[in-house]
Image (cartoon, rainbow, N blue to C red):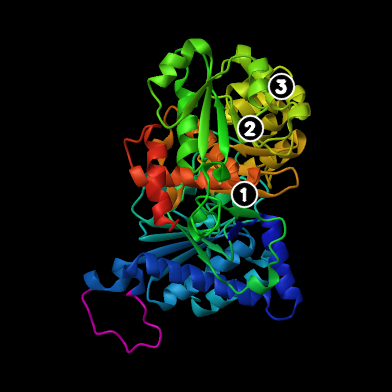
Amino acid sequence: MTELLTSAQMRAIEQAAIDSGQVTGLTLMERAGAGVVQAICDTWPEFAAADVRGAAPRPAASPRSTLEKAKRAAVLCGPGNNGGDGFVVARLLAERGLTVDVFLYGDAEKLPPDAKITHDRWSAAHPVAPASTLKGWTGQCYDLVVDALFGTGLSRPLDAEVLAIHKFLSVHPKAKVVAVDGISGIDLDSGKALVVDEALFFAAADLVVTFHKSKLGHFLGPYVADQSQQICVDIGLEAFDDGAGQVAVVDMSCGGFQLRKGGESGGAHKFDSGHALVLAGPAGQTGAARLSARGALRSGAGLVTLGVPPEAQQEAAAQVTAIMLRSLETADDLTATLQDRRINALCLGPALGLDRAKALVLAALDGGLGARPTVLDADALSAFAAAPEALFDLVHEQCVLTPHGGEFARLFPDIAAKLCAAPLAGPAYSKVDATREAAKRAGCVVLLKGAATVIAAPDGRCSLHSAHYARAAPWLATAGAGDVLAGIMTGLMARGLTPFDAAETAAWLHVECALKFGPGLIAEDIPEQLPAVFKDLGL
């Protein structure tokens, strides 16, 4: 399983390695710089072709075809250890034959000890081309620009000098831009920009190279789309990383769950795979619940029943076949239905109607009926917007709340305010922080939806599914997609997955189905991709 780190966790791992005496900070810096250069060459072979270390002198060539004319690089080095990585990158690129200009932000004499050594090594190798100050940047044309200004340790907003370079690179896209650790100015704990003026923008990176493990900010915040490719370089820290408190990246392609319960003989009964109950709204509004029910059925629940008000039964019956129907309108109807203990998972909320939702949630979570796994979505959440504490008093550890951003703000207004506040210092409050705090307050699993979906449990466990990079599926932003997600989750809980595991798995399957279908996706298509996805997983 892949985990994501905060800046503090990364520093602690590095310090543990250094304290062990098995490695020095300078060695880690050299490994990092070498990893950046290798990533550049692997991504763009035209830079790899420039490798002249230990090679015989190149034959004479016309000035127009020489490497010095063809490949130029600028390396922007900051005042900390990220800048030290940059000096290593500059030295190794120059050894490959590139013409390299280095620009230092800050005073060389104030660099941290290891970064000062890499600076001095560059200066000794290039006495006629020492590092210029950042003010020396005049916007020359480069083939490659390496941003090693600020990495994981940034804690203050960028100043105008650095932002001017971002602006230049944004409007002069000729150069390949490589960010060391992350785009300078982006807090790598939250993915938020540390700027005074929110209107300012950042240069996109063609390549982000980070070390040991990716950071939270590589998957959170509005600038993820500006990182077109990310490579994580191993610098030898695995032995010093115990994984404690880290956020897991959801990836079910590695296996870990079964399509159905029952023995290997295949003789399972349909009730062995659970019976999910999905509540529907009034006539003309049953579509959302029908999408949820289809998601529950396709995700492997043995039976799915749609609880429908009497006036909407004909409408629902005309649209479903394998899904069963039950007349269910009031809280008393639900209480009577739940006497059937074979119903082992519930989904309430999609287009349920605010006028009915609160009473039905109260009935569903009635302690006298037992604590069944329950997904609360949409109207089941909004019905408690005026008094969220009333909902938190009802929910139990078998529940999952699945808010989008607006619903989250109604349930957790103070947490949402912290999340939306413009950060002036790092580490900034992140979506991970917010979801963890919400789960602890609610006393159940919270799945905060979005392109980066964060799942947290009251005990602090947290995972993230990000629909970015190779898993970007923008066409998933379509009406009803969230209803299907709630249904998939319900079906998985009916099959016996814990609420946390079901939330993780459903988030991954949801995006996998969208990727399987491709552009043009509508919500109805999502459940129908599940059989193919399961087949690809070997289930």
Cβ atoms at labels 1 and 3 below 8 Å apart = no
Regarding residue 256, the answer to whether it shows in the image is yes
- Residue 272 x %, y %: 57, 45
Count how many numbered circles sit on residues in the image: 3
Marks 1 and 3, how far apart at CA: 29 Å
| Residue depicted at x 52% and y 29% | 305
> Picture coordinates of residue 206 (x, y %)?
41, 54
Q: In which quarter of the image is residue 69?
A: bottom left
Q: What amino acid type is highlighted by mark number 3? A: Leu
Q: Please state which amino acid type lies under the numbered disc 1.
A: Ser
Q: Distance between the residues labelled 2 and 1?
A: 21 Å
Q: Do the residues labelled 2 and 1 touch (CB within 8 Å)?
A: no
In the image shown, does 222 or 130 lie closer to the viewer?
222
Which mark sits nearer the N-terminus, 2 or 1?
2
Tell me the crowding category of disc 1: few under 14, some 14 to 19, or many 20 or more residues within 10 angstroms, Cα based.
many
Q: In which quarter of the image is the C terminus?
A: bottom left
The residue carrying mark 3 is 362
In front of the other: label 3 or label 2?
A: 3
Residue placed under numbered mark 1 in the picture: 463
SS of the residue under disc 1: strand
Q: Give coordinates of residue 519: x percent, y percent.
A: 32, 39
Q: Is residue 362 above or below residue 123?
A: above
Q: Magenta segment range?
A: 49-62
Relative to 333, 371 lies left or right: right
Instruction: Reply above or below: 317 against 9.
Output: above
| Residue in front for this viewpoint, 54 or 357 | 357
**Residue at the extreme left of the image, as rendered:** 62
289 drawn magenta: no
Residue at (48% x, 49% y) in the render: 165
